[in-house]
Amino acid sequence: MKKKPDEDANKKADASAPPPPPEELPVDKEEAKTLKKIYIAVTSDRGLCGGVHSGVARRIRRQMAALPTESPVPKIVCIGDKSRAMLRRQYAASMLVSVKDIGRIAPVFADASTMAAAITEAGYTYDIGEIFYNKFFSAVKYELSMVPFFNKTRIESAPNMNAFDDVDDDQLECYAEWTLAALLYYALKESAASEQSARMSAMDNATKNAGDMIRKLTLLFNRTRQAVITRELIEIISGAAALK
């Protein structure tokens, strides 16, 4: 029996989607004030791509400024030198992990696994984390997005966990680490595609602006040269007429 084209398309779309984070329990306002959070900024080391990197940094600044005064100060993980340069001056005390050499080559899952291991080995016990990245839509459109991730305790208390009879702590720990690595890999891929599209648009605009400037300067040069030639001809004719 052959599969329908719509079913194949749906499966391909599901395969390209990020792994869904585990469903968490509802959090009241009082509990939300005591949650320990981690903000992960996904950028790169390369520039010349418009406001791709600065948008992520601005979003984290707004998140930090909107926190209640009694809430714990979230830790910040900077993936890419651009976000680190934008955030370290104001939030140097909140920096947990900084990753360099991002964006030179295409990201692979091993890179995301190394980052997830570095965050885990940093020793900070968090409740909820948020990954800020640019989601790619088309060659001319990208959108700043956020995807959450949780620690083992929050996953264990999720409503959907009741569907499983017995889950070991080691399995939950491995699942939490794998989920973080998978989400980081997804965010890295989306950010890389968004960065390339933004860089292509920025370079195209720069080429057009350079072409316009060249045409204007060429026209100005030709007019100035013509004016100099005309003035010299007038002086020569005036001098010849004076000698007669």
Image (tube, rainbow, N blue to C red):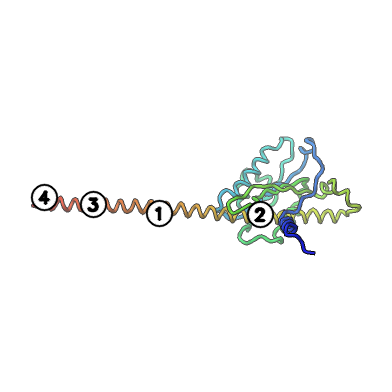
Mark 1 neighbour density, 10 Å: few (under 14) some (14–19) many (20 or more): few
Residue 165 showing in the rendered view: yes
| Secondary structure beneath label 2 | helix
Dot 3 or dot 1: first in sequence order is 1
**Residue 81 locus on image (x, y percent):** 61, 53
The quarter in which the N terminus is drawn is: bottom right
| Secondary structure beneath label 1 | helix
Q: Read off the residue under disc 1.
A: 214
Q: Is residue 59 above or below residue 196?
A: above
Depth check, front residue: 50 or 211:
211
Mark 2 neighbour density, 10 Å: few (under 14) some (14–19) many (20 or more): some
Q: Nearer the viewer, mark 3 or mark 4?
A: 3
Question: What numbered label is drawn on residue 190?
Answer: 2
Q: Read off the residue under disc 4.
A: 242
| Secondary structure beneath label 3 | helix
Dot 4 or dot 1: first in sequence order is 1
Q: Alpha carbon of mark 2 to alpha carbon of mark 3: how far? A: 60 Å
Which residue appears at 26% of the width and 52% of the height?
A: 228
Q: Alpha carbon of mark 3 to alpha carbon of mark 4: how far? A: 18 Å
Q: Amino acid at mark 1?
A: Ile
Q: Amino acid at mark 4?
A: Ala
Q: Read off the residue under disc 3.
A: 230
**Residue 186 locus on image (x, y percent):** 70, 55
Q: Is residue 137 above or below residue 68?
A: below
